[in-house]
């Protein structure tokens, strides 16, 4: 269980970093911080659902 959470956290950090990098390279898309935080929020919601369901 903890290995899965660690792996998903690392993938999430990579996803947030990739979003921030892409938006930083193409500023017309949006503000980098806003996109990175939105991606982090969605990822946190997914992690919460996975941990909650797997805990049952």
Image (cartoon, helix red, strand yellow):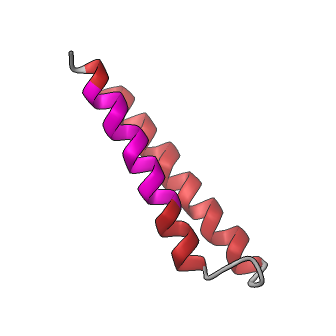
Give whichever of 49, 4 is nearer the camera. 49
Residue 14 in view here: yes
Q: Quadrant of the N terminus?
A: top left
**Position of residue 52 measured from the top left corner of the image (x, y, whole percent):** 26, 28
Please say whether residue 1 is visible from this viewpoint.
no
Picture residue at 72% right of the left edge, 69% below the top: 22
Q: Residues in magenta?
A: 39-52
Query: Outermost residue, top direction?
Result: 56
* Vertical order, 2 against 44 (above or below): above
18 above or below 22? above
Residue 27 percent across, percent down from the top left: 74, 84
* Rendered location of residue 12, percent (x, y): 49, 48
Label total for image: 0
Task: Tell me which residue sits at (46%, 48%) in the image.
Answer: 43
Q: Residue 25: x and y, percent?
A: 76, 78
Q: Is residue 12 above or below residue 26?
A: above
């Amino acid at each position: 269980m903890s290995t899965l959470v660690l792996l998903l956290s690392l993938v999430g950090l990579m996803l947030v970093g990739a979003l921030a990098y892409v938006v930083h390279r193409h500023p017309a898309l949006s503000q980098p911080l806003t996109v990175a935080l939105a991606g982090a929020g969605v990822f946190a919601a997914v992690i919460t659902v996975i941990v909650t369901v797997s805990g049952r």
